[in-house]
Image (cartoon, rainbow, N blue to C red):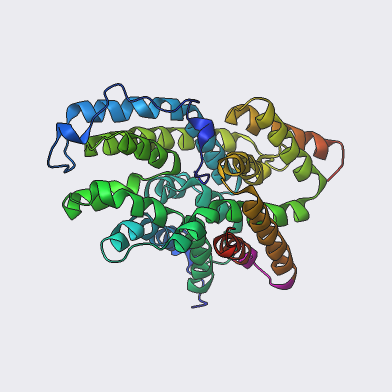
Amino acid sequence: MNADLGIYGTYVAIFAMVLATYPMRVGGYWLMAHVPLTPRVRRILEALPGAVIVSTVLPILAREGVPAAIGIAAALASTLIRRNDFVALIAGVAAAAAARAMGLG
Amino acid sequence: MLSVAISSLVPRGGVATKRRMSSADHPSNRPYWSRAGAALGARLALPLIPGYIAFGLAVGATGASKGFSFIAVLLMNAFVYAGASQLIAMEIWPAKLTLATILGMALIIATVNARMLLMGASLRPWLGPLPWWQAYPMQHLTTDPGWILAMRYRAEGGNDAAMFLANGLVLCGVWMTSTSVGYWLGALVSEPRRFGIDLVMPIFFAVMLIPLWRGGTRKMRRGIAWLVAGGVALVVQHLVPGWWFIIAGAVAGALAEGFADER
């Protein structure tokens, strides 16, 4: 389990990612032919995207500090003003880069 | 994409299918394949393309900035084809690739992608009568925004499997193109940190929270779930090395929302 996989490592890892993704795409479809989803399971799965995002971003924010916070704030503000994914992304990255250039990180 | 409520990508007022197909057109109510359905699916994909390109550029640039080869990024984009989980994977990519570290990463990816179980489940009533060799390969094309379109089409009485396939193929083509362009753009930036490229993932994710918040029907419950997710993630980050805080926070938050009984 702990042997370094060397040059094949990346491809083994990508294959593992496929195994962690495609079964999720068809798993619910398959399952519905056998057992129905309960409302509670449905609610839990519906809650997952937001919970994943919060629990991914918050610790990164804590680690990366002020520039990350400024970048995220700029992107959120941009989205609230005018919904455009491009503008939000550029605003966020530019604000974070500016904060770093000013030595805030 | 991760946000199930990609209302941002769909024009307000909903997607109007030009020709409303009622189940009365096909009394058997079985899914069928038609050229018209394929054309409709392709056309319905158009409003999603700008958001797709932005996300694809972000994923491609991240791949380049993290030092992945173009082939690896290409394989990931084609066969994993789940941008949010790819962004997380590239962020947490183990420095030493062993079966153990790969398994740990795969568990986190599976958690991130578990929401797709719900999408597949909701496709069953529509695609269920198709033979397995049509229904299963086709669902590799399921994405959050594409799924929302498909559900609307279905709710309006649509039953043409070609709509789903053509819609998915157009979006996948845009994805492969934009991620590749993003990779080469990202490769031009020699110092990703200086230009904030390393923060693309958290920035994009944070923006996705807005439609997820607006789309939620019970804000109180969702707010508590997010507090639980964030709190658990921060605590686990302090106590446990590695990236387990993603699973711990995500599962805790999702369970909190699922078990908070509405009253």
Q: Nearer the viewer, residue B209 or B77?
A: B209
Q: Give, as a single range, the part of the protein colored magenta.
A: B239-247
Give yes or no for residue B243 being in the magenta stretch. Answer: yes
Q: Position of residue B31 (x, y in %)?
A: 19, 42
| Residue A7 shows in this picture | no
Give yes or no for residue B155 being in the magenta stretch. Answer: no
| Residue B229 shows in this picture | yes
Question: In the displayed image of the protein, which residue is found farthest to the left?
Answer: B28
Question: What is the count of numbered marks?
Answer: 0
In this picture, residue B47 sits left or right of residue B155: right
Q: Position of residue B66 (x, y in %)?
A: 59, 49
Above or below, comparing residue B207 to residue B262 in the picture: above
Question: In the displayed image of the protein, which residue is found farthest to the front?
Answer: B263
Q: Nearer the viewer, residue B111 or B62?
A: B111
In this picture, residue B147 sits left or right of residue A33: right
- In which quadrant of the rendered view does residue B158 lie? top left
Residue sitting at 35 percent across and 38 percent down? B150
Q: Position of residue A2 (x, y in %)?
A: 52, 77
